[in-house]
Image (cartoon, helix red, strand yellow):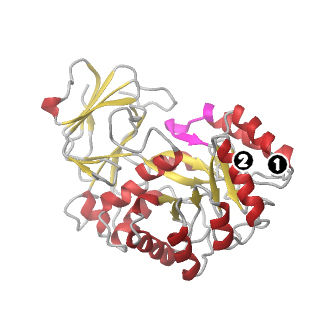
Amino acid sequence: MALAAGPEKQSGKLVVRNVGLMLSGRLDEPILDADTVVAEGGRITAVGRGKDCDAEGARVTIDARGCALAPGLIDNHVHTVFGDWTPRQNQLGWIEGCMHGGVTTMISAGEVHLPGRPRDPVGAKALAIVARKAFENFRPLGMRIIAGAVIPERGLTEADFAEMARAGVVLMGEIGLGTVTGAEEAREMVGWARAHGMTTVTHVGGPSVPGSSYIGADVVLAADSDVASHINGGPTSLDLAQIRRICEETTRAVEIIHNGNPRTGLYAMRTMRELGKEAQLTVGTDAPAGSGVQPLGMLRMVSLLSSLGEVPAERAWAWASGNVAAVRRLEAGTIATGMSADLVLMDRPQGSDGRDVLDALGKGDLAGIGMVLTEGVVRIGRSRNTPPAERIPEIVS
């Protein structure tokens, strides 16, 4: 069967059977007592034991051959521009590379790397609208890319946010990437964006690129964005006292990224868990960036947070899938009826000391990915980027 490259949804019934281990992407029940998933029209219709699921009339059947199944990872923080290209590193194909790392959805934090990026209100608004519409029509390997995050610039008005919302914009980019940097102006702009259905983020830490700003705990908490972006720095971190203050006082999501400070990322993770705020933890890469593009960045974060943070890998996976989906109001990121059939099939990498894929991740290894689906369509087989898996799923019909 030829693999699909475009955005089409699966027509007819999809059945994935003989799953050895199923991760839900939810903290309340991170591992499911199930070995079968059924989907139709790109959505999951049944999850359970094979004897209890209607597998008759399947158009596509996948034998997982004992592999683990998990919801696709959702990168909460990328900086797309246009096409599968990043001017930051002058690299082609980085989005497809991330699909090979188990990422099925990307969320823009602002198209800040566009050469000659306009900084006036009209230009900022136009860039957000065209990026949103362009990536709705462009989905390399079927990746879902939620782009068009308007960069907060002085001079934007609530009427501008209303116009962008009518045009389909659902994101505001990082407070601190544009000219809006003060507490009062940030809070006002977050309020306008939220009133028009957009989710919002605030840069945390030192400047990331020339023209961006240092944003400390005072502004982060005053802005009250939906996400405190890269609490471990993007890439330069705040001090531990400010990180703890944000963790203690925020009622919003806290994001830990790959392209940040690993020491303070682990500190923030442990602090949020200590405070009973694990449901507010999210994960991203903040790529492309000066440190490059990491196709396995999200997978590496699950491994790092699990192994060095001594957290069960299935919980770290939920931070990187279901938690992000909840903050961003996406019908994805969890293995449950009605959710998008964005699935990753994986196994212990060959040669790992881990007993299974979760134990391997918990010991600092990466998973070996054998297949990735979005909206019920097989997009890739064995990953070109992860180490080879012990077992590989097979399309049997």
- Tell me where residue 128 appears, x and y as whole percent: 73, 43
Q: Is residue 75 magenta?
A: no
Q: Quadrant of the N terminus?
A: top left
- Tell me where residue 178 appears, x and y as whole percent: 78, 59
Residue 216 appearing in the image: no
What kind of residue is marked 2? Trp
Identify the secondary structure beneath mark 2: helix
Is disc 1 in contact with disc 2, using a CB cutoff of under 8 Å?
yes
The residue wearing badge 1 is 156
Q: Looking at the image, which residue is at 82% across and 46% down?
A: 157
Identify the secondary structure beneath mark 1: loop
Q: Which residues are magenta?
A: 136-146
In the rendered view, tell whether residue 312 sits above or below residue 325: below
In which quadrant of the rendered view does residue 222 lie?
bottom right
- Tell me where residue 218 appears, x and y as whole percent: 67, 72
Is 43 situated left or right of 18 in this image? Answer: right
What kind of residue is marked 1? Leu
Most extreme residue toward the left is 51
Is 278 situated left or right of 141 in this image? Answer: left
- Tell me where residue 163 appears, x and y as whole percent: 76, 35
Residue 212 appearing in the image: yes
Find residue 192 and name its label: 2
Choose mark 1 or mark 2, whichever is in front.
2
Q: Quadrant of the C terminus?
A: top left
> What count of labels does the image hold?
2
